[in-house]
Image: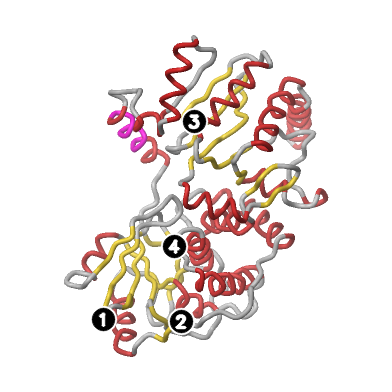
Amino acid sequence: MDTLETLVQEIELENKREEASDPAVKKMLGVVEEFLKHHRVMCYGGTAINNLLPKSEQFYDSSTEIPDYDFFSETPQQHAMMIADQLVKLNLPNIEVKPGMHLGTFKVFADFHGIADITHMDKPIFEKLWKENVVHGGIHYVTPNFLRMSMYLELSRPKGDVSRWKKVYTRLQLLNKHHPMTCPGNFPLPKDLEERTKKDVIRMLKHHDVILMGFSAASQHAEKTVWVTPVVLLANKDTIETLTKGKKVTVKEGSEILPTRHDVVEHGDVTMSFYETQACHSYHMTRDRIKVASIPTLLQFFFAYLYTDAHADEVSRILCVADRLVELATHDKGRTFPLLTPRECLGHQETLIEMKKHRSEVFKQVSKDRSSPDFMRSFFSYVPPLSKTEKNNLTKRVHKL
């Protein structure tokens, strides 16, 4: 059996090496890489992490693995068309742009090879990331903090694809080693939570499915609990509506990276901020039955907040607290909870089947008019070559998105 397994590994490696050295594949990737160097897009994902590491620490072997380029764009449909047209000019066969499983992502294929995944990102978040992007080899990459956010997101969801955790954690350690977090220094301290509000919050945490988040939760991980205002919490939407009934509440709609927030306002100040769960978020249970967000859950939310709602005077505080949490995540010394990634979690984790059902429902809703903006935003496709008239009409519709 050992001999058979060895033979299989050798054959697989040989096949991978042959595919990676195929001149046609190199041509395809060359088109994508040139595009990345000359357009307003930012790479993320495994290839981005790999390329930002020193050669000696990179986990992809270019002689056997074909890079899978994932990148953000404000206009993914336009950019997918441009790449497809360039591939056609090189006489490469079977060029196609298809919608991905995740709405807003478009996949470019050449001769049945997936060579690029282009994902839409809203302009405000894109602008913030663009100001901090890292340029390496002429290609723009999202900031290491955003890459960290994506990996902590995976590690914070025990009902997600846990088979990836080992790989993700290994890559995270490499990224933290070569692109460490930095604390900019002094930052304004938040106000202490009033004693009355503190008692109400503790009572609520003990008797309802609510997770403690934010700076108060971060302090719990460092064995020195500090209650600050506003206290940040995480709960299902129904729970939030029940707990805030009769109170003055302002709602901040969610973004691509941060869920909807409900702010409880008292005497003109926000005393509590509830985020809606958008997956099954991991937490620790304290001895007095309080749910405290795990370090991966906290870091995912801190980084997401940094690129969406953070005010200038909050940025330094978030970076410094996140720096300490990353340190605690890497070394368990001084950590309140020994386990980094607990299995307990709150919220509904969408399964692959549910994702497919949701996608199918959206398709039914918008497919009555396949030239409509709603259809084009989620299910745009392109198979060149088209006639001049067809191409012009499609281009006009894409530019209106």
Separation of disc 4 and disc 2 at Cα?
A: 16 Å
Badge 1 or badge 2: first in the primary sequence: 2
Picture disc at residue 190: 2
Which quarter of the image is occupied by the C terminus? top left
Q: What residue is pinned by disc 4?
A: 309
Which quarter of the image is occupied by the N terminus? top right
Residue 312, position in %: x, y? Answer: 51, 69
Residue 150, position in %: x, y? Answer: 55, 53
Badge 4 or badge 2: first in the primary sequence: 2
Q: Which residue is depicted at the point 37% across and 55% down?
A: 254
Q: What residue is pinned by disc 3?
A: 77
Tell me whether circle 3 and circle 2 mark residues in contact (CB < 8 Å). Answer: no
On whether residue 358 falls in the magenta region, the answer is: yes
Q: Answer few, some or many: residues within 10 Å of disc 1's Cα (few below 14, many 20 plus, some between 14 and 19).
A: few
Give, as a three-letter code, the residue at label 1.
His
On whether residue 148 falls in the magenta region, the answer is: no
Badge 1 or badge 3: first in the primary sequence: 3
Range of residues picked out in magenta: 357-364
Q: Which residue is depicted at the point 53% across and 71% down?
A: 318
Give, as a three-letter code, the residue at label 3.
Gln
Q: Which residue is depicted at the point 75% across and 52% down?
A: 53
Badge 4 or badge 1: first in the primary sequence: 1
Q: Which residue is depicted at the point 54% across and 21% down?
A: 96
Tell me whether circle 1 and circle 3 mark residues in contact (CB < 8 Å). Answer: no
